[in-house]
Each structure stands twice: as C-alpha cells, then as structure tokens.
C-alpha cells in the first residue's frame, strides 16, 4: 500500500498573508500552477 510520502509534493512554494496579490500571481505564473498555499 502506498503512503502519503509516496505521493506528496516536496519543496512546496508557499506565500505568507502579507504577500501581495501581485506577488501571488507572479509566483503562480512562474511555477505554472493554479494555486499556492498561504501559511500563517
């Protein structure tokens, strides 16, 4: 049986609540992703 470690994403890019929407949009465009976790 697979474990979470087998399918998890490593080195996840995160944003902080103080980052701007422009920074979030730029990071998502650079990484070609549709969302980035925001961690407090």
Image (tube, rainbow, N blue to C red):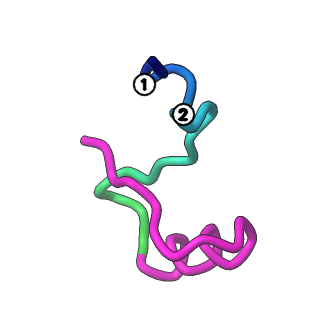
Q: What element carries label 1?
A: helix
Residue 12 spot, x, y in % from top left:
56, 41
Quarter of the image with the N terminus in it: top left
Please identify the quarter of the rendering in which residue 4 is found.
Answer: top left
Mark 1: few, some, or many residues within 10 Å (few <14, many ≥20)?
A: few
Residue at image coords 33%, 53%: 38
Residue at image coords 57%, 38%: 9
The answer to whether 16 is drawn above or below residue 6 in the figure is below
In this view, the residue in front, 2 or 15, is 2
Residue 5 spot, x, y in % from top left:
51, 20
Q: Does the magenta stretch include residue 27?
A: yes
Mark 2: few, some, or many residues within 10 Å (few <14, many ≥20)?
A: few
The answer to whether 20 is drawn above or below residue 8 in the figure is below
In the rendered image, the residue lying farthest to the left is 40
Q: In this view, does 33 lie to the left or right of 39?
A: right
Which residues lie in the magenta part? 21-40
Residue 37 spot, x, y in % from top left:
38, 54
- Residue that mark 1 sits on: 4
**In the rendering, which numbered label is found on residue 17?**
none
The answer for how far apart the CA atoms under marks 1 and 2 are is 5 Å
Residue 33 spot, x, y in % from top left:
60, 71
In the rendered image, the residue lying farthest to the right is 30
The answer to whether 2 is drawn above or below residue 23 in the figure is above
- Whether pointer 1 and pointer 2 mark residues with C-beta atoms closer than 8 Å, the reply is yes
Q: In this view, does 7 lie to the left or right of 15?
A: right
Residue at image coords 33%, 58%: 18
Q: Is residue 34 magenta?
A: yes
Please identify the quarter of the rendering in which residue 26 is found.
Answer: bottom right
- Residue that mark 2 sits on: 7
Count how many numbered circles sit on residues in the image.
2
Quarter of the image with the C terminus in it: top left
Q: What element carries label 2?
A: helix
């Amino acid at each position: 049986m697979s474990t979470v470690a087998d399918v998890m994403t490593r080195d996840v890019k995160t944003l902080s609540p103080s980052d701007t929407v422009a920074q979030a949009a730029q990071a998502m465009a650079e990484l070609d992703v549709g969302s980035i976790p925001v961690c407090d």
